[in-house]
Amino acid sequence: MNDVSVNSASIKAQVESVHANLLEDLPDIGRVAVAVYDGRTDTLKTFVHSTRGATPFNHYEAKLAEVPSLAELAETRGERIIGDLHASGNALGRHDRQLLESGYSSSYTKPFFDRGELSGFMFFDSEKGNYFSEAVVRHLTIYSHLISLLIINALASANVLRSAVDVARAISHLRDEETGAHLDRMSRYARMITRTLADQEGLDDEFVEFVFLFAPLHDVGKIAIPDRILLKAGRLTPAEFEIMKTHVAKGVAIVDKMAKSFSIGDSAHIEVLHNIVRYHHESYDGSGYLTGRKGKDIPLEARIVSVADVFDALTTKRPYKEAWSNDDAFRFIDNLTGKKFDPDCVGALLSNRRQIEAIQRQFRYAKGQFEGFHEAYLDDL
Ligand code: C2E
Ligand code: SIN
Ligand code: SIN
Ligand code: FE
Ligand code: FE
């Protein structure tokens, strides 16, 4: 099977290109940023930015309710111009203060909406004071519209995939009651590892979110594995394990078909999904399956998911094994550093023990509780 080819640019690259265009007319807007809003959790997250010079916000996340100035803009559908960040002094919120410290003097903020619902905010920042005159703001309208279309479109295809993830999860719940909690935990371990590596590897928030979004699909191909193998109480025979390994190729076929039928196959983030499914059982030393790729030739998202998946598989009960303690699992993974696992990903896992324990506390479904959760999923189908 061929790798999915990626034709269109990432959202970040698209926003950067709009920014480059905009700089031809408005040369003093050093930064364009977009934070997206998730209404279910009232959370606002930096999603993309295009910045000349220092970056004031990395991986920023807040509840909208905790940022009253933005909450008000969303409510009134207004826009906000801060002409002189210096003059505003102590009245500034945390975000604006960081902006000031990074050398920006004035800013223009505008919420954007999709079918009436808040989608997020756009931030235009300038090193010059009082840059956002009425004429500049008028000039910006066309650009802000373009950016909001780009973002809304990107979020819509991510949402289609999110629904596909939910369906895949609901189907696997029919067979394996632990699976839902496994996916909740492993996708959070994967996000935690990705965030930890973000600065060092130059990963943006968009990538972090797509790893989190797509990690739960790593084993979709298990749908095609017969119960007598998937749910076997003991060790697999070599012949059974050969069948088990086909879950990777079957998973690739499923996600590639899904991408095609939703005609989102040409967006860059679909490659993250494809790579996670295709390469999650590769080993750093080349001894894994299905391709035997090694080292950094294995896409980073797959190296990350491999560590997250195995850590959770080890620390939970499976039809074929008991749960290991965290210490045993850490030791096991540490011993396979550079053999099965990428050293950087292992380092990122081992440096976050407290956060791992918090995730385990949050996503430990008691049996009764989990059955309710399971039925709720089925009702949605
Ligand atoms: P899984 O249960 O999600 O496990 C994912 C990966 O975690 C495994 O990939 C393996 O690398 C690691 N892992 C999980 N439990 C253990 C363990 O007790 N010891 C060690 N050394 N590693 C462990 P792998 O081996 O490629 O297996 C892929 C899938 O095949 C597993 O996914 C599971 O569904 C199935 N499988 C593997 N071995 C057995 C088995 O002995 N019996 C049964 N019933 N299923 C198995
Ligand atoms: C941003 O500018 O990237 C979002 C932070 C904020 O001003 O709330
Ligand atoms: C799945 O069947 O989709 C996930 C099962 C697992 O990861 O153990
Ligand atoms: Fe797998
Ligand atoms: Fe798994």
Image (tube, rainbow, N blue to C red):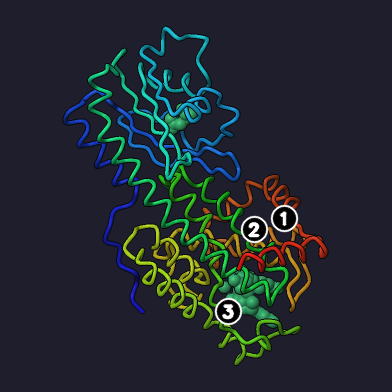
- The Cα–Cα distance between marks 3 and 2, rounded to whole angstroms, is 18 Å
Identify the residue shown where x is 25% and y is 35%: 142
Identify the residue shown where x is 29% and y is 27%: 30
Check mark 3 vs ligand 3: CB closer than 8 Å? yes or no: yes
Q: As rendered, which of 280 and 127 lies closer to the eye?
A: 127
Instruction: Please provide percent x and percent y for residue 53.
Output: 32, 28
Q: Tell me the quarter of the image containing the C terminus.
A: bottom right
* Snapshot quadrant of residue 326: bottom right
- The Cα–Cα distance between marks 1 and 3, rounded to whole angstroms, is 23 Å
* Snapshot quadrant of residue 170: bottom right
Left or right: 163 as drawn, with respect to 373? left
- Numbered tag placed on residue 184 in the rendering: 2
Q: Do the residues labelled 1 and 2 touch (CB within 8 Å)?
A: yes
Q: Which amino acid does label 3 sit on?
A: Ile
Q: As rendered, which of 299 and 328 lies closer to the eye?
A: 299
Instruction: Please provide percent x and percent y for residue 283.
Output: 51, 70
Check mark 2 vs ligand 3: CB closer than 8 Å? yes or no: no
Q: What residue type is labelled 2?
A: Asp
- The Cα–Cα distance between marks 1 and 2, rounded to whole angstroms, is 7 Å
Identify the residue shown where x is 74% and y is 77%: 319
Identify the residue shown where x is 53% and y is 28%: 71
Q: Mark 1 points at which residue?
A: 363
Seen from this angle, which residue lies furthest front?
116
Q: As rendered, which of 38 and 172 lies closer to the eye?
A: 38
- Numbered tag placed on residue 150 in the rendering: none
- Numbered tag placed on residue 223 in the rendering: 3
Instruction: Please provide percent x and percent y for residue 135.
Output: 22, 20
Q: Tell me the quarter of the image containing the N terminus.
A: bottom left
Q: What residue type is labelled 1?
A: Phe
Seen from this angle, which residue lies furthest bottom?
239
Dot 1 lies on which element?
loop
Instruction: Please provide percent x and percent y for residue 333.
Output: 63, 62
